[in-house]
Image: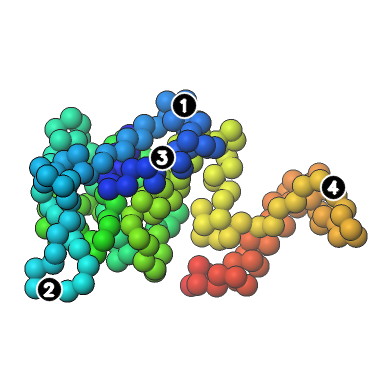
Amino acid sequence: MRIDIITVLPELLKSPFDASILKRAIDKGLVEVHLHNLRDYTENNYNQVDDYQFGGGAGMVMMIEPIDKCISQLKSQRSYDEIIYMTPDGKTLNQKIANSLSLLENIIILCGHYKGVDQRVRDMFITKEISIGDYVLSGGELGAAVLCDTIIRLLPGVLNDETSALTDSFQDGLLAPPVYTRPAEYKGVKVPEVLLSGNFGKIEQWREEMAHERTQRLRPDLLE
């Protein structure tokens, strides 16, 4: 998989890909992540990529021309399955979306900034708009990092145990059940006996029951 991220703050995105699971995935050649500084695509003497809104109003708007140039250059080199715009008014990211995107080959992620992008960018280039929650960030970079993490960890070979991702919360529409590790008793609090029984049929039944119980208690909306 190849992910191209268009941003005005590439330095903000370097750290998430330089550690842990994402770095290992890149080092193993399972994914390529390329950062593109939008200011490299403007002919403005001051590297300006934003301007005032037509009609007035507070906040600057990202201009269409540098975005067009960047996207057009990338598309001249390969085909893309999705061109994603990170925006608060996009569709809220969930596990189903992450699963779907992890099956693609090439995607572009455009990070919004300031008051957003010229609407013509959304109309002409964007194929999917994604939000990571009903709140506003200073820019789309952190959202793009979250999106990449949800996608990359699903790629075959990224996790040491590929079945781990399949048992995460939301994969089956439920929250994950409680998990425990050693010691079996700590300060008088014991691990549930069923997990120590070695009876895998009963263990799976317990986990399913606990998943339903936790979901009903913490996220009943998932069961609707």
Rendered image: mark on residue 56: 2
Asked whether the residues under the numbered discs 1 and 2 touch, taking CB atoms below 8 Å apart as contact, a structural biologist would say no
C-alpha gap between disc 1 and disc 4: 35 Å
Bin the neighbour count of mark 1 within 10 Å (Cα to Cα): few under 14, some 14-19, many 20 and up: few
SS type, badge 2: loop
Identify which amino acid the numbered label 4 is placed on: Pro
Q: Nearer the viewer, residue 11 or 83?
A: 11
* Quarter containing the N terminus: top left
Residue at the limit of the structure toward the right, as seen here? 188
Identify which amino acid the numbered label 3 is placed on: Lys
- The image position of residue 6, as x and y in percent, is 26, 44
First-in-chain label (1 vs 4): 1
SS type, badge 4: loop
Rendered image: mark on residue 27: 1
Of tags 3 and 1, the one toward the viewer is: 3
Q: How is the image coloured?
A: rainbow
Which residue carries the number 3 mark?
14
Identify which amino acid the numbered label 2 is placed on: Gly
Which residue carries the number 4 mark?
183
Q: Is residue 155 above or below residue 52?
A: above
User: Could you tell me which residue is drawn at 32 percent across and 35 percent down?
Assistant: 34
Q: Nearer the viewer, residue 141 or 154?
A: 141
Residue at the limit of the structure toward the front, as seen here? 46
Q: Is residue 29 left or right of residue 58?
A: right
